[in-house]
Image (spheres, rainbow, N blue to C red):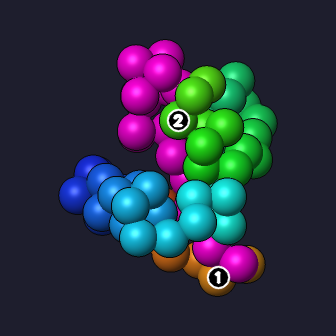
Amino acid sequence: MKKGTIEEIFSKAKFADNPNKYKVFYRDFGQIIEKTLPEFVKESDNFQIIPISRIERIERNNSILFEKRKKVE
């Protein structure tokens, strides 16, 4: 898991950029949910309700900053 990468993106967004430019896509009961970074942090209660492992992708201005790799079988 790229926990360090995700934490780095969140930190930069919160302290050095506009967090509303960031979109977080996460798994929730088999579907992908899209939220702005501030919405995600609030809803996840700082990763207590939605763990970091469920994040699938993070985008800023439609550029992908993080994407979970799919396992090839």
Marked residue nearer the N-terminal end (2 or 1): 2
Residue 34 visible somewhere in the drawing: yes
Q: Secondary structure at mark 1?
A: strand
- Residue placed furthest toward the left: 4
Q: Give the residues in magenta.
A: 44-61
The residue at 53%/35% (across/down) is 41
The residue at 57%/28% (across/down) is 42
Q: Secondary structure at mark 2?
A: helix
In this picture, residue 44 sits left or right of residue 21 = left
Q: Nearer the viewer, mark 2 or mark 1?
A: 2
Q: Amino acid at mark 1?
A: Ser
The residue at 50%/71% (across/down) is 17
Residue 56 within the segment the image draws in magenta: yes
Is 69 above or below relative to 38? below
Residue ID for mark 2: 41
Residue ID for mark 1: 63
Which is nearer the eye, 35 or 15?
A: 15
Residue 71 visible somewhere in the drawing: no
Q: Residues within 10 Å of mark 2 (few under 14, many from 20)?
A: some
Q: Amino acid at mark 2?
A: Val
Give the Cα distance between marks 2 and 1: 20 Å
